[in-house]
Each structure stands twice: as C-alpha cells, then as structure tokens.
Image (cartoon, grey):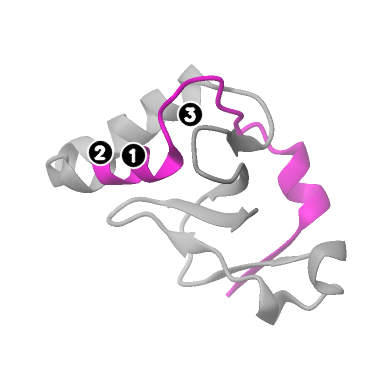
Amino acid sequence: MRLFSLLALVASPLLIQSASAQTFDDFVRRVESAPYIQRSAVVDSFLAAVPSVPYVDGAAAQPTAHFLWRGSASTVQVAGDLNGWNPSQAGMTKVSSTDLWHYDRA
C-alpha cells in the first residue's frame, strides 16, 4: 500500500490542470481504448500537454480536481485535511493497465 499526503501530491509535477474542453473521463476512455502497448505513451502525452497542478476538470457538469500519482503500487491512498488525515477515506483509482492513479474531488 502506498500512502501520500495531499501536500506531497500538490508538489508533484504530475498533477495537471485542464484548460481544454476534454474531460478527465474522456482521457480515461482514450487510454482504455488504446492498444495495451500504447497506453503509457497516451498517459505521457496527456501529462506533458497540461503540466500544472492539480488537474481541474472544468468541462464536466461540476468542476472536479483530479489529484494524480504515477508509480507502481497495488493501492494508493491520500491523507490530508480533506479526510481528517484518514487515508482509508480517500483511495486512489488506477487507470486501467497503466501506472497512473487518480483521486477525484468535486
């Protein structure tokens, strides 16, 4: 299990902010529809295109901040003021067949 504080996530260059109309869900669908061997390249391209923190999905019905972490793990959890420093209340979700994890907060 990996445990990260929100402070560590905010400092990460892998957190990104969207100024485009593409939603984060659109990105996830694009990754999942790509051939397995190309998924890492799709993630690389996405992270390089919008390198600021955090990724704010303003194109969604309700703006959502997506906190991202990239790395190998079986589970990743976030601890911070948002959950009273209780990491069991903020588990990250892995983007299928990649090493990219996200926690979404509206």
Q: Secondary structure at mark 1?
A: helix
Residue displayed at 55% across by 26% down: 18
Q: Is residue 15 magenta?
A: yes
Give the camera-side residue of 17 and 8. Answer: 17
Amino acid type assigned to the residue bearing label 2 in the image? Arg
Q: Amino acid at mark 3?
A: Leu
- What's drawn in magenta, residue-wise? 1-30
CB contact under 8 Å: marks 3 and 2: no
- Relative vertical location of residue 94 with respect to residue 43 in this rendering, above or below: below
> Can you give x and y, in whole percent of width and height, for residue 11 in the image?
77, 38
Whether the magenta-drawn stretch holds residue 18 is answered as yes
- Residue 69, percent from left and from top: 57, 49
Q: Amino acid at mark 1?
A: Asp
Residue 53 in the image: x percent, y percent? Answer: 69, 32
Question: Of circles 1 and 3, which is in front?
Answer: 1
| Residue beneath the point at 51% across and 72% down | 75
x, y percent for residue 8: 77, 49
Give the Cα separation between the discs numbered 1 and 3.
Answer: 14 Å
Rendered residue at 62%/36% (across/down): 56
Q: Which mark is residue 47?
A: 3
Marks 2 and 1, how far apart in space? 6 Å
Q: What residue does disc 1 label?
A: 26
State the mark number for residue 96. none
Q: Earlier in the sequence, mark 3 or mark 2?
A: 2
Question: Which residue bears the numbered disc 2?
Answer: 30
Give how far apart the Cα atoms at labels 3 and 2 are.
Answer: 14 Å
Residue mark closest to the camera, 3 vs 2: 2
